[in-house]
Amino acid sequence: MHLAPCESKFSMKQNYKLIIEYDGTNYHGWQRQARDRSIQGAIEAALKIMTKEDVVLNGSGRTDAGVHALGQVANFRCALKLAPHAFRAGLNSLLDNDIVIRGCELADEQFHARYDVKTKTYRYNILNRTLPQAIGRQYAWHIRKPLDLETMRQASASLVGSHDFKAFEGSGSPRSHTTRNVTRVGWLQKNSDLLWFEIEADGFLRFMVRNLVGTCVDVGLGKKSVKDFLTILESRDRTQAGATAPPHGLSLLSVKY
Amino acid sequence: MHLAPCESKFSMKQNYKLIIEYDGTNYHGWQRQARDRSIQGAIEAALKIMTKEDVVLNGSGRTDAGVHALGQVANFRCALKLAPHAFRAGLNSLLDNDIVIRGCELADEQFHARYDVKTKTYRYNILNRTLPQAIGRQYAWHIRKPLDLETMRQASASLVGSHDFKAFEGSGSPRSHTTRNVTRVGWLQKNSDLLWFEIEADGFLRFMVRNLVGTCVDVGLGKKSVKDFLTILESRDRTQAGATAPPHGLSLLSVKY
């Protein structure tokens, strides 16, 4: 069989996997944009400087403007055969200090950071006390009124398993398939003021975590009951759920393959 | 005795004490400046809006550009007799979210936040690992090479008590009196990556904490010995000490009266 030049060239490329931490405060989200700063765009620009190639970076999924990551995963293919640690060091020296390449490794030729995802885990931070904070304000949603953690736990426990999460999908971004399988979920009292919502699933709809958090907070404030929460989940109706929690409390913790 | 109008007016003023947290990243330090943003300037501007008076805010001391505070203390006098909690709420609603008034209370008429200081405590954060961090990078000095905590502890232990700290004073800011009394000092391993240097004293020379940290780090890296550190302290010679640690690792934790 005769290989066309482009296929031949493709097969010579190496596939690299990156683990990426970023502070999303000053970015318009993961996805490359024509004008605005994005995480994908910043890393692709740094890869272009290193490789002189137009490298496409496949993220495990988008994160919205202002959302952070401790363990976003992405892959890219390029002809330049650089050692993974050299890519990591080179990218870190080129990138602004709000993006850090935590790891770089060679991946299987077929590996794709989005298609191959098994589960992703997100964390949402809430600062629950009267006073706001200056130090670290970029990373937690401040809620003044006391939250009832016990009812929030009861509500979120109902999320485990396979459910149609249409009621928690952001408007204007419909997916044909809105059922996701939640493998782990919980509210943790990190310290006297700080609450963590953590959720692991095989996938997430747009704004799903932030809509779940917003609706759980309504339960914690007594605006909705645990039974209301279950009714909303079953309704598949976005208009019944609570407000979308702000982006800066959310971080993509890790992605499993 | 006849009171002049200004004295009479002064005696009618109330003296308020503030506890202030701030993220110094976007400020040119505590002290009011003609053009640049300062913490003092921002709070005085907010006080002017609330009181319609030209209020002078006395801080416990300056913090340099980029230095943070969790418990800076300041006092101000004004004729407007507002409840302390109303000042706190009003200021917090007027200030940007990188400054938070944590507390406001009525103070003795004579209380002065700078003259009456008994001790101040500073903390310096060091991230000691190969990789930098994106989340929280604003609050810790990143040092890649491993630090030997034991020798840093031995060096810093020699600081307790009354010493002439002239060797650790920033150049271009001489004080007539450079002896300070250190009541508590230590290096803490906060977690596997994070080190805290904490120091309490009756006062600090300009850049003193950052120069002490820079010189301790030289000890931790093996560039200087514990004996060198003691020699530098005794030398009273700035040129012998290590480099000044960067400002963003430093926070004023608390002030005692």
Image: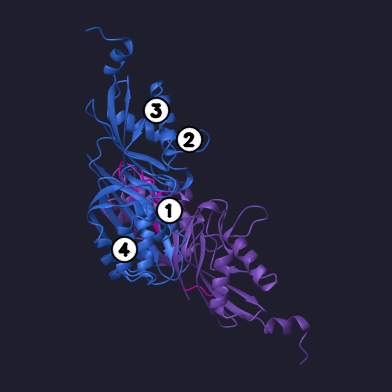
Chain colours: A blue, B purple
Q: Which residue is mark 2?
A: A33
Asked whether the residues under marks 1 and 3 belong to the same chain, the reply is yes
Chain containing the residue with disc 3: A
**Crowding at mark 1 (Cα within 10 Å: few <14, some 14-19, many 20+):** many
| Residue sitting at the far bottom | B1
Callout in the foreground (3, 2): 2
Local secondary structure at mark 2:
loop
Local secondary structure at mark 3:
helix
Query: Alpha-carbon distance for marks 3 and 4?
Result: 48 Å
Identify the residue at image location x=68%, y=84%: B11
B194 or A41, nearer to the observer: A41
Local secondary structure at mark 1:
helix
Q: Which residues are magenta?
A: B114-138
Chain containing the residue with disc 2: A
Q: Is residue B74 above or below residue A199?
A: below
**Crowding at mark 4 (Cα within 10 Å: few <14, some 14-19, many 20+):** some
Query: Alpha-carbon distance for marks 1 and 3?
Result: 27 Å
Task: Residue type at mark 3: give it.
Answer: Leu
Chain containing the residue with disc 4: A
Q: Which residue is mark 3?
A: A47
Residue A242 lies in quadrant: bottom left
